[in-house]
Image (tube, rainbow, N blue to C red):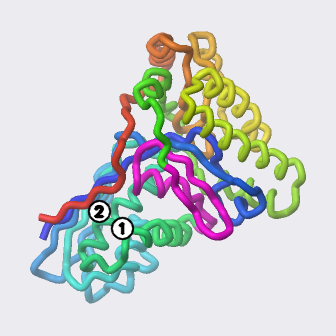
Amino acid sequence: MIIESSAPTRVDLAGGTIDIPPLFLFHEGAATVNFAINLMARCRIETRSDDKIILESIDRGVSFETSLEHFNELKNEPRLELLSKLVYFFKPETGFNMITESEAPAGAGLAGSSTLNIACIGALNKLVGDRYAPEKFIPIAANVECQVIRVPTGFQDYFSAQYGGVSAIHFRPDAMEREALEVDTEMLHRRVVVIYTGEPRNSGTNNWEMTKRHIDGDREIFDIFEGIRDSALNLREALLHGDWTAVGEILHRAHPQRKRLAPNITTPKMDELIDIAYQSGAIGAKVCGAGGGGCIAFFCEESRRNEVAEALAKEETVEVLDWKIAPDGLIVNEF
């Protein structure tokens, strides 16, 4: 049996960090807005006739071998820890090769690990006979990833990976709900430049510091999160109404708000790149993920996307990403 799965990464536009439990419980109407992009995470499983289990990450250049006889060792295996813990959770009863690959740069802030998580869950669930319904994938992904990074994880990344498209994810006491946003995706593509700065970061650590300050009762942090919630809701409305002027204004105002929440969300090099983009026709800058490196998305004046991209491409270490909206989420095929 051969199983192949894929899932898209994402660019988060508004509402990030408020998707971490229990933070959204303190901000009524909490939501995030993001869009999936065609930088994919992929997983391929091929069953074996023996009891060997071989896990390999192509982009990380790491692989190792174990067996069903030593299966329980995967629980605390430090090599390819996420893959190991996922395999341990699903407990397949056959040997197999599992190969993964992520097209997003490491530490880019595009939800690469969360997306890979969903892709692997889809493949492993198929391997064990569709043990879990798809609505269980996101809770499994969040809980297993929490075991790996050892701090609570945000949920928005799993929704973009599983469902694709442009989304608003609403966080309520009774449920999390994804809303597919019907927007002009061609216009969104024409006005957004995404770059990789070449400076990876650890999102789990950054997010946990903000979470602790909120839980400890920091009033300033609480008020900033109220603003983050409002930005996400306002951006949702602007996108649904095709009000691109408002989209730019919301994103422009949101960046300084993010800097108040976490001054280290940008590095000096990132601040320099943001200045270059603004001088070339960008209206707003959105540091992807928890910041501190990785990717930045720039919302540009109409017809100035190429000008912004060309100015940024001249900078050392910068990679202007070739992306498109990914309309579909997780895909699993069995051969």
Left or right of residue 162: residue 93? left
User: Residue type at mark 1?
Assistant: Ile
Residue at the spot of label 1: 121
- Give the mark, 1 or 2, whose residue is nearer the N terminus: 2
Local packing at callout 2 (Cα closer than 10 Å; few below 14, some 14-19, many 20+) is some
Residue at figure coordinates x 58%, y 38% from the top left: 13
Query: Which of the 4 quarters of the picture holds residue 127?
Result: bottom left
Residue at the spot of label 2: 63
Does the magenta segment cover residue 175? yes
Q: Position of residue 71 (x, y in %)?
A: 32, 84
Residue in front for this viewpoint, 249 or 181:
181
Residue in front for this viewpoint, 52 or 165:
165
For the residues labelled 1 and 2, say whether their Cβ atoms are less than 8 Å apart. no
Which quadrant is home to the N terminus? Answer: bottom left
Q: Which residues are magenta?
A: 150-179
Q: Position of residue 64 (x, y in %)?
A: 29, 68
Query: Which of the 4 quarters of the picture holds residue 153?
Result: bottom right
